Image: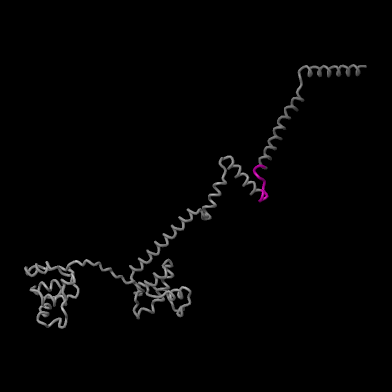
């Protein structure tokens, strides 16, 4: 759509009075209806309006005007302004809440505080259209109607749209994530205390022995301590008792052959004993005959 000049009716009045342009050309340039331009020429429309020269205020070039007067099919265009007009942006305040819905705002605020605690007070104010003291009173349960406040979804109540609520929640979540990352980065940079689980794990890893034998000894010492606390013999005591039993058995085994060796006789000794027995018998027979 073509840009319309400032004060189109005043510009149309000047073009009708001072140029030979057709009604259609003036209507197209001023963004008016052709019949309205005809009414201006007849004096039925824009009575008492003073004409404004578009050439003087820089909205129309003289070349454009001459070309349009020479050719009825030519359409004039508004000249681009050489002055940059800053865009005025109004600060968006709290959302307007109709009177019929204002009684539902405490319920909506309670629902937001319970289900989305990450939202800031300013975000709740924009979503529901309330004030910070009201939010604080509902949070502290000091509101005059706290007994009758029931948490309700503000989207269901018609106080805000689901899109606005999702955007606010996502924005709050992103902000919380950025703050958490910033704190972790500062903690790593400053070398502050780590979480308890990580600290304990590092201490245990540092105190663990390097060799498997040392680990076995450590485990045995722990088992011995537990057995001593329970009043039971330790593995070392059981091993000493078993070693003593084996030693006694070995000693008995070694003494048994010695005793057997003491009881054995040689052939000569046996023969000598037999001769002694025969001599004894001979002497006894001689005594009997005598």
Quadrant holding the C terminus: top right
- Say above or below: 246 vs 15: above
Q: Nearer the viewer, residue 162 or 265?
A: 162
Drawn side of residue 61 relative to residue 228, left or right = left
- Residues 251 and 134: in front is 134
Count all numbered tags in the image, as a single digit.
0
Work out whether residue 279 or residue 178 is closer to the camera in this orientation and state it: 178
At horizontal 74% and vertical 27% (from top left) the residue drawn is 258
**Where residue 62 sits in the image (x, y, percent)?**
12, 68
Query: Based on the displayed image, in which of its 4 quarters is residue 81 positioned?
Result: bottom left
Residue range corresponding to the magenta coloring: 228-236
Judge left or right: residue 224 versus residue 39. right
Q: How is the image coloured?
A: one colour
| Near-viewer residue (280 or 42) | 42
Expressed as whole percent of the image width and height from the top left, the position of residue 187 reads 48, 55
Quadrant for residue 34, please give it: bottom left
198 sits left or right of 123 in the view = right
Residue 93 belongs to magenta span: no
Residue depicted at 22% across the width and 66% down the height: 82
- Residue 276 percent across, percent down from the top left: 84, 18
Q: Return the residue found at the far front.
A: 56
Q: Quadrant of the N terminus?
A: bottom left
Task: Give x and y (percent) for residue 153.
Answer: 38, 72
- Up-down relation of residue 284 to residue 207 (above or below): above
Asked if 176 appears above or below 42 in the picture, the reply is above
């Amino acid at each position: 759509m073509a840009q319309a000049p400032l004060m189109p009716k005043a510009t149309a009045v000047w073009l009708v009075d001072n140029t030979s342009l057709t009604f259609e050309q003036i209507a197209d340039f001023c963004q008016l209806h052709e019949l309205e331009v005809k009414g201006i020429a007849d004096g039925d429309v824009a009575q008492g309006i003073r004409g404004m020269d578009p050439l003087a205020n820089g909205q129309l070039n003289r070349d454009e005007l001459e070309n349009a007067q020479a050719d009825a099919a030519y359409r004039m265009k508004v000249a681009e302004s050489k002055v940059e007009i800053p865009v005025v942006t109004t600060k968006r305040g709290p959302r307007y809440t109709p009177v019929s819905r204002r009684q539902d705002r405490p319920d909506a605020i309670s629902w937001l505080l319970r289900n989305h605690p990450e939202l800031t007070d300013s975000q709740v104010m924009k979503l529901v259209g309330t004030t910070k003291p009201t939010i604080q009173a509902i949070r502290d349960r000091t509101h005059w109607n706290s007994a009758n406040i029931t948490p309700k979804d503000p989207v269901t109540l018609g106080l805000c749209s689901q899109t606005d609520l999702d955007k606010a929640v996502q924005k709050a979540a992103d902000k919380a994530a950025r703050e958490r990352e910033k704190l972790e980065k500062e903690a790593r940079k400053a070398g502050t205390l780590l979480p308890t689980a990580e600290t304990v794990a590092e201490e245990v890893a540092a105190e663990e022995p390097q060799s498997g034998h040392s680990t076995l000894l450590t485990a045995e010492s722990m088992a011995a301590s537990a057995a001593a606390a329970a009043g039971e013999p330790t593995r070392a005591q059981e091993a000493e008792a078993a070693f003593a039993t084996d030693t006694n058995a070995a000693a008995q085994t070694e003494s048994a052959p010695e005793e057997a060796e003491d009881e054995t006789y040689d052939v000569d000794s046996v023969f000598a004993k037999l001769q002694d027995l025969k001599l004894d018998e001979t002497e006894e027979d001689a005594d009997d005959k005598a």
